[in-house]
Image: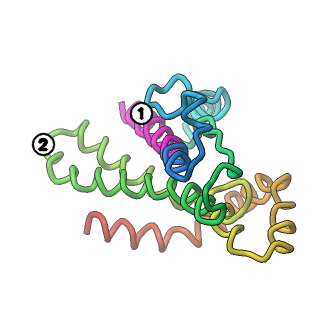
Amino acid sequence: MEYMIMVVVLFFSVIVHEVSHGYVALLNGDPTAKLAGRLTFNPLPHVDLVGTIIVPALLLISQSGILFGWAKPVPVNPRNYRNYQLGEISVSASGPLSNFFLAAAFAQLLPWADTNPGFFLLCKYGIIINLYLMLFNLIPIPPLDGSRIVMPLLPRVLQELYAQLEPVGFILILLLLYSGIWSALVRPIFRVLMNLLVG
């Protein structure tokens, strides 16, 4: 039951993350996600075979103790933004911010969950999973959202150098994760955020 709750929370949270990107892109003048039918909370258009099904399933089967996954990225076209810099930053930041707001919403529900173990687990993992999704996506390594927030603020020459990291971005991310560096950096921030939300 506990793992099923984690899967439901993870799936819901990554969908909200992606829909937020698409909706804020629309506000900035880019209708790409809307035209692709991706501004919906129907899970089917967001399913990514690897990230939504295979990776979470392998983690559950292996009883790894962690659960991770992702939805199919929402398509956006920055050339449609009325203001490129503002559009790129706000669209990129909207995903992590949506996860923070979800964590805050689950934290508000937590005091009402004392007498219902299932609801308590839902709120608990709603906070934990969304905070970790936010912090993970804010890593400033392409193609994660953090890099899309930082890149528009750099001079063009540095933007071009930064963008060249993308082909090896996931290798760098895996190194951060498996070396323990990311955990060491994020754990104190996670504790501060948890104290902020639940006291």
Residue at 55 percent of width and 27 percent of height:
37
Q: Which residue lies furthest to the top in this view?
A: 44
The image position of residue 118, as x and y in percent, is: 25, 36
List the residue tagged with mark 2: 115
Q: Where is residue 93 in the image (x, y as percent from the top left)?
A: 54, 60
Q: Of helix, strand and loop, which mostly describes the magenta segment?
A: helix
Name the residue at 60% across, 45% down.
Answer: 30
Q: Which residue is drawn at 59% across and 59% down?
A: 87
Residue matched to label 1: 8
Could you say which is closer to the camera, residue 4 or residue 136?
Answer: 136
Q: Does the magenta stretch include residue 5?
A: yes
Which secondary structure lies at badge 2? Answer: loop
Quarter occupied by the N terminus: top left
- Residue at position x 54%, y 68% in the image: 186
Identified by mark 1, the residue type is: Val
Q: Is mark 1 on a helix, strand or loop?
A: helix
Q: Quadrant of residue 5?
A: top left
Using the image as rendered, state which of residue 115 and residue 42 is in the foreground. 42
Q: Which amino acid does label 2 sit on?
A: Thr
Residue lying furthest bottom: 155
